[in-house]
Amino acid sequence: MAPTNLINKRTYADLTETPRTPRFKDFDDIEYDDTHSNWSIFVSVEVKFLPNKYGDNICFVLMDKTGAKIEASVWGSAEVARFNRILQPGCKYTIHRVIISPNMEYVEFRAIEHLFECHFDQKTVVEPSLPIEFPILPKHLMPFSDVAKRPNKTFVDIVGIVVHCCERECFGRYGKYREAIFMDAWGNLIAVRIWGLQLTHNSYLWSTAEGGNPIIVIATMLEKDIKFGDLNSSDYTNVAFNPAHRATRPLQDVRQKIINRAIDMAFVRRFVERRCAFVAMVLAKRDARYKK
Protein backbone atom coordinates (compact mmCIF):
# COMPACT_ATOMS: atom_id res chain seq x y z
CA MET A 1 0.00 0.00 0.00
CA ALA A 2 1.43 3.35 -1.01
CA PRO A 3 2.28 5.67 1.86
CA THR A 4 -0.02 8.56 2.40
CA ASN A 5 1.69 11.97 2.52
CA LEU A 6 0.05 14.30 5.03
CA ILE A 7 0.52 17.95 4.19
CA ASN A 8 0.33 20.26 7.19
CA LYS A 9 -0.93 23.68 6.24
CA ARG A 10 -0.09 26.57 8.50
CA THR A 11 -2.66 29.24 9.07
CA TYR A 12 -1.87 32.78 10.20
CA ALA A 13 -4.06 35.14 12.13
CA ASP A 14 -5.05 38.30 10.34
CA LEU A 15 -3.18 40.99 12.26
CA THR A 16 -4.62 43.84 10.24
CA GLU A 17 -6.05 46.38 12.70
CA THR A 18 -9.79 46.67 12.50
CA PRO A 19 -10.86 50.33 12.14
CA ARG A 20 -12.22 51.60 15.44
CA THR A 21 -14.30 54.57 16.41
CA PRO A 22 -11.95 57.18 17.94
CA ARG A 23 -12.11 57.43 21.72
CA PHE A 24 -12.12 61.08 22.73
CA LYS A 25 -11.00 62.27 26.13
CA ASP A 26 -11.14 65.66 27.88
CA PHE A 27 -8.12 66.42 30.04
CA ASP A 28 -10.04 66.65 33.32
CA ASP A 29 -11.58 63.22 32.68
CA ILE A 30 -8.24 61.41 32.44
CA GLU A 31 -7.72 58.69 35.04
CA TYR A 32 -4.73 56.46 35.72
CA ASP A 33 -6.40 53.53 33.93
CA ASP A 34 -6.43 55.65 30.75
CA THR A 35 -2.63 55.94 30.62
CA HIS A 36 -0.36 54.18 28.12
CA SER A 37 -3.14 53.76 25.59
CA ASN A 38 -4.22 55.65 22.48
CA TRP A 39 -6.80 58.44 22.67
CA SER A 40 -8.16 61.19 20.44
CA ILE A 41 -8.40 64.81 21.57
CA PHE A 42 -9.91 68.10 20.38
CA VAL A 43 -7.37 70.81 21.22
CA SER A 44 -6.28 74.37 20.69
CA VAL A 45 -2.52 74.94 20.67
CA GLU A 46 -1.97 77.60 23.32
CA VAL A 47 1.84 77.59 23.36
CA LYS A 48 4.52 76.11 21.16
CA PHE A 49 7.94 76.18 22.80
CA LEU A 50 11.12 76.22 20.78
CA PRO A 51 12.81 72.86 20.11
CA ASN A 52 15.76 72.07 22.36
CA LYS A 53 19.28 72.80 21.16
CA TYR A 54 19.67 69.26 19.77
CA GLY A 55 16.43 69.48 17.79
CA ASP A 56 15.14 66.18 19.16
CA ASN A 57 12.49 67.44 21.61
CA ILE A 58 9.68 69.98 21.46
CA CYS A 59 6.80 70.70 23.85
CA PHE A 60 3.36 72.23 23.46
CA VAL A 61 0.71 73.49 25.87
CA LEU A 62 -2.73 72.35 24.73
CA MET A 63 -6.21 73.42 25.84
CA ASP A 64 -9.32 71.29 25.36
CA LYS A 65 -12.84 72.57 24.72
CA THR A 66 -13.57 72.80 28.47
CA GLY A 67 -10.59 75.10 29.15
CA ALA A 68 -8.35 72.49 30.80
CA LYS A 69 -4.66 72.54 29.83
CA ILE A 70 -2.04 69.85 29.47
CA GLU A 71 1.52 69.62 28.19
CA ALA A 72 2.44 67.51 25.17
CA SER A 73 5.93 66.45 24.15
CA VAL A 74 7.52 65.03 21.00
CA TRP A 75 10.84 63.18 20.79
CA GLY A 76 13.01 62.38 17.76
CA SER A 77 14.41 64.78 15.16
CA ALA A 78 12.09 63.67 12.36
CA GLU A 79 8.95 63.88 14.49
CA VAL A 80 10.00 67.21 16.02
CA ALA A 81 10.37 68.69 12.53
CA ARG A 82 6.99 67.24 11.54
CA PHE A 83 4.98 68.53 14.49
CA ASN A 84 6.84 71.84 14.54
CA ARG A 85 5.62 72.37 10.99
CA ILE A 86 2.04 71.13 11.51
CA LEU A 87 1.01 72.51 14.91
CA GLN A 88 0.75 76.29 15.11
CA PRO A 89 -0.23 78.43 18.14
CA GLY A 90 -3.83 79.62 18.13
CA CYS A 91 -4.98 76.87 15.75
CA LYS A 92 -7.39 74.05 16.56
CA TYR A 93 -6.85 70.39 15.74
CA THR A 94 -8.28 66.92 16.14
CA ILE A 95 -5.39 64.64 17.09
CA HIS A 96 -5.63 60.83 17.06
CA ARG A 97 -3.37 58.14 18.53
CA VAL A 98 -2.25 60.33 21.41
CA ILE A 99 -0.50 58.50 24.23
CA ILE A 100 -1.32 59.73 27.74
CA SER A 101 1.05 59.02 30.63
CA PRO A 102 1.56 60.21 34.22
CA ASN A 103 3.38 63.53 34.54
CA MET A 104 7.13 63.02 34.89
CA GLU A 105 7.99 66.47 36.25
CA TYR A 106 9.91 64.95 39.17
CA VAL A 107 12.25 63.30 36.65
CA GLU A 108 12.34 65.89 33.88
CA PHE A 109 11.37 69.57 33.61
CA ARG A 110 7.74 70.27 32.75
CA ALA A 111 6.46 73.77 31.98
CA ILE A 112 3.01 73.50 33.58
CA GLU A 113 1.38 71.50 36.33
CA HIS A 114 -0.93 68.56 35.54
CA LEU A 115 -1.26 65.00 36.80
CA PHE A 116 -0.84 63.69 33.25
CA GLU A 117 0.89 64.56 29.98
CA CYS A 118 0.55 63.68 26.29
CA HIS A 119 3.04 62.21 23.85
CA PHE A 120 3.00 62.36 20.04
CA ASP A 121 4.94 59.91 17.86
CA GLN A 122 5.09 58.65 14.27
CA LYS A 123 1.66 57.01 14.61
CA THR A 124 -0.06 60.21 15.75
CA VAL A 125 -2.49 61.65 13.21
CA VAL A 126 -3.35 65.37 13.09
CA GLU A 127 -6.49 66.68 11.39
CA PRO A 128 -8.09 70.13 11.21
CA SER A 129 -10.56 70.50 14.06
CA LEU A 130 -14.33 70.61 13.76
CA PRO A 131 -15.93 74.05 14.32
CA ILE A 132 -15.90 73.73 18.11
CA GLU A 133 -15.82 76.82 20.34
CA PHE A 134 -12.84 76.97 22.70
CA PRO A 135 -12.63 79.26 25.74
CA ILE A 136 -10.23 82.21 25.67
CA LEU A 137 -9.08 81.77 29.26
CA PRO A 138 -8.16 78.54 31.10
CA LYS A 139 -10.62 76.91 33.46
CA HIS A 140 -8.17 76.24 36.29
CA LEU A 141 -6.21 79.07 37.93
CA MET A 142 -3.55 78.33 40.53
CA PRO A 143 -3.99 79.48 44.14
CA PHE A 144 -1.19 81.73 45.41
CA SER A 145 -0.28 79.13 48.06
CA ASP A 146 0.46 76.58 45.31
CA VAL A 147 2.51 79.06 43.26
CA ALA A 148 5.13 79.06 46.02
CA LYS A 149 5.56 75.29 45.62
CA ARG A 150 6.20 75.33 41.89
CA PRO A 151 9.78 74.82 40.59
CA ASN A 152 11.81 77.62 39.08
CA LYS A 153 11.13 78.61 35.44
CA THR A 154 7.75 76.89 35.38
CA PHE A 155 4.60 78.68 34.21
CA VAL A 156 1.43 79.41 36.17
CA ASP A 157 -2.00 80.96 35.54
CA ILE A 158 -3.35 83.21 38.31
CA VAL A 159 -6.19 85.60 39.09
CA GLY A 160 -6.02 88.46 41.56
CA ILE A 161 -6.82 92.08 42.36
CA VAL A 162 -4.06 94.49 41.40
CA VAL A 163 -3.68 96.51 44.59
CA HIS A 164 -0.39 98.22 43.74
CA CYS A 165 1.58 99.05 40.62
CA CYS A 166 5.01 100.67 40.60
CA GLU A 167 4.71 104.29 39.51
CA ARG A 168 7.89 104.29 37.49
CA GLU A 169 9.13 101.92 34.85
CA CYS A 170 12.30 100.07 35.82
CA PHE A 171 15.05 98.60 33.67
CA GLY A 172 16.01 94.96 34.02
CA ARG A 173 17.67 92.18 32.09
CA TYR A 174 14.86 92.08 29.50
CA GLY A 175 14.32 95.84 29.17
CA LYS A 176 11.64 97.99 30.79
CA TYR A 177 9.17 96.56 33.27
CA ARG A 178 6.70 97.55 35.98
CA GLU A 179 6.01 95.54 39.09
CA ALA A 180 2.40 94.91 40.08
CA ILE A 181 1.16 93.40 43.34
CA PHE A 182 -1.69 90.90 43.03
CA MET A 183 -3.96 90.02 45.98
CA ASP A 184 -6.24 86.99 46.25
CA ALA A 185 -9.54 86.72 48.12
CA TRP A 186 -7.73 85.77 51.36
CA GLY A 187 -5.35 88.74 51.36
CA ASN A 188 -2.29 86.84 50.12
CA LEU A 189 0.05 88.93 47.96
CA ILE A 190 2.33 88.10 45.08
CA ALA A 191 4.61 90.28 42.93
CA VAL A 192 4.37 90.14 39.13
CA ARG A 193 6.80 91.87 36.76
CA ILE A 194 5.17 93.06 33.54
CA TRP A 195 7.56 93.13 30.58
CA GLY A 196 7.51 93.90 26.88
CA LEU A 197 4.30 94.04 24.91
CA GLN A 198 2.15 93.32 27.95
CA LEU A 199 3.47 96.56 29.43
CA THR A 200 3.35 98.79 26.37
CA HIS A 201 -0.07 97.65 25.13
CA ASN A 202 -1.74 98.04 28.53
CA SER A 203 0.35 100.80 30.12
CA TYR A 204 -2.66 102.99 30.94
CA LEU A 205 -4.59 100.15 32.60
CA TRP A 206 -1.58 99.18 34.69
CA SER A 207 -0.98 102.78 35.75
CA THR A 208 -4.57 103.16 37.03
CA ALA A 209 -4.79 99.72 38.65
CA GLU A 210 -4.48 100.74 42.28
CA GLY A 211 -5.79 103.14 44.87
CA GLY A 212 -9.45 103.83 44.35
CA ASN A 213 -9.65 101.81 41.15
CA PRO A 214 -8.38 98.26 41.77
CA ILE A 215 -8.94 95.88 38.88
CA ILE A 216 -9.27 92.12 38.68
CA VAL A 217 -6.73 90.54 36.35
CA ILE A 218 -6.26 87.04 35.01
CA ALA A 219 -2.70 86.48 33.80
CA THR A 220 -1.67 83.23 32.14
CA MET A 221 1.73 81.65 31.48
CA LEU A 222 3.62 83.72 34.04
CA GLU A 223 7.14 82.40 34.60
CA LYS A 224 8.32 81.82 38.15
CA ASP A 225 11.58 83.41 39.26
CA ILE A 226 12.82 81.97 42.57
CA LYS A 227 15.79 84.34 42.83
CA PHE A 228 13.62 87.47 42.96
CA GLY A 229 10.61 85.71 44.51
CA ASP A 230 8.16 86.86 41.86
CA LEU A 231 6.46 86.00 38.58
CA ASN A 232 7.40 87.42 35.19
CA SER A 233 5.26 87.93 32.13
CA SER A 234 6.56 85.94 29.16
CA ASP A 235 6.15 85.88 25.40
CA TYR A 236 3.26 83.45 25.98
CA THR A 237 1.44 85.54 28.61
CA ASN A 238 -2.18 86.56 28.06
CA VAL A 239 -3.68 89.23 30.35
CA ALA A 240 -7.41 89.87 30.78
CA PHE A 241 -8.69 92.89 32.75
CA ASN A 242 -11.96 92.47 34.69
CA PRO A 243 -12.86 89.32 32.72
CA ALA A 244 -16.12 87.37 32.93
CA HIS A 245 -14.75 84.21 34.56
CA ARG A 246 -16.07 82.10 37.40
CA ALA A 247 -12.77 82.49 39.29
CA THR A 248 -13.33 86.25 39.58
CA ARG A 249 -16.61 85.97 41.50
CA PRO A 250 -15.07 85.69 45.00
CA LEU A 251 -12.92 88.74 44.19
CA GLN A 252 -15.81 91.02 43.23
CA ASP A 253 -16.84 91.43 46.87
CA VAL A 254 -13.28 92.15 47.97
CA ARG A 255 -12.78 94.68 45.19
CA GLN A 256 -15.93 96.55 46.20
CA LYS A 257 -14.78 96.69 49.83
CA ILE A 258 -11.44 98.13 48.73
CA ILE A 259 -13.23 100.80 46.70
CA ASN A 260 -15.45 101.63 49.71
CA ARG A 261 -12.31 101.74 51.94
CA ALA A 262 -13.74 99.03 54.16
CA ILE A 263 -10.38 97.21 54.15
CA ASP A 264 -7.23 98.70 55.67
CA MET A 265 -4.60 98.36 52.92
CA ALA A 266 -1.63 99.20 55.18
CA PHE A 267 -0.42 95.59 54.89
CA VAL A 268 0.06 96.15 51.14
CA ARG A 269 2.34 99.14 51.80
CA ARG A 270 4.37 97.07 54.27
CA PHE A 271 4.65 94.26 51.70
CA VAL A 272 5.90 96.73 49.06
CA GLU A 273 8.52 98.12 51.46
CA ARG A 274 9.79 94.64 52.35
CA ARG A 275 9.74 93.73 48.69
CA CYS A 276 11.91 96.74 47.72
CA ALA A 277 14.40 95.88 50.46
CA PHE A 278 14.56 92.25 49.31
CA VAL A 279 15.15 93.17 45.65
CA ALA A 280 17.85 95.65 46.68
CA MET A 281 19.58 92.93 48.70
CA VAL A 282 19.51 90.48 45.76
CA LEU A 283 20.88 93.11 43.37
CA ALA A 284 23.62 94.05 45.87
CA LYS A 285 24.78 90.44 46.04
CA ARG A 286 25.09 90.39 42.24
CA ASP A 287 27.10 93.64 42.19
CA ALA A 288 30.81 92.94 41.71
CA ARG A 289 31.68 95.69 44.20
CA TYR A 290 30.14 93.63 47.01
CA LYS A 291 31.89 90.38 46.11
CA LYS A 292 35.02 89.47 48.01
Image (tube, rainbow, N blue to C red):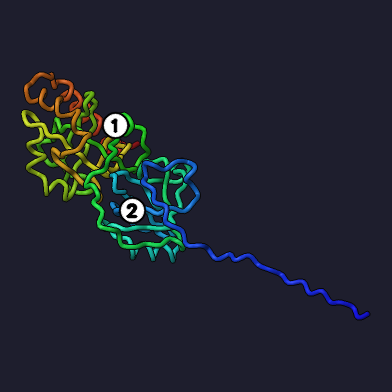
How many circles with numbers are drawn on the protein?
Answer: 2
Work out whether 5 lies above or below 228: below
Q: Which residue is mark 2?
A: 42
Instruction: Residue 160 in the image: state x and y as whole percent.
Output: 20, 33
Q: Is residue 97 above or below residue 135?
A: below
Q: Is 43 displayed left or right of 216 in the figure?
A: right
Q: Is there a contact, CB below 8 Å, between mark 1 and mark 2?
A: no
How crowded is the residue under tag 2: few (<14 C-alpha within 10 Å), some, or many (20+)? Answer: many
Q: Nearer the viewer, residue 164 or 119?
A: 119
Please identify the residue farthest to the front as the structure is shown: 1
Horizontally, is 122 left or right of 212 in the view? right
The reply to whether residue 230 is in sight is yes
Within-10-Å neighbours for mark 1: few <14, some 14–19, many 20+ = some
Left or right, residue 116 beside residue 140: right
For this rendering, which residue is in front, 67 or 108? 67
Q: Is residue 75 visible?
A: no
Residue type beneath disc 1: Pro
**Image spot of residue 178 (x, y percent):** 16, 40
Mark 1 vs 2, N-terminal side: 2
Q: Quadrant of the C terminus?
A: top left
Q: Is residue 86 left or right of residue 121?
A: left
- Kind of residue sitting beneath label 2: Phe
Residue in the image at 39% along x and 51% along y:
24
On screen, 163 above or below 128? above
Q: Position of residue 285 (x, y in %)?
A: 30, 35
Residue 218 occupies which quadrant of the picture? top left
- Determine which of the numbered discs, if any, sits on residue 253 in the image: none
- Seen as rendered, the residue at the extreme right is 1
The quadrant holding residue 31 is top left
Label 1 sits on a secondary structure element that is loop
Question: Relative to the observer, which residue lies in front, 21 or 94?
Answer: 21
Q: Which residue is mark 1?
A: 143
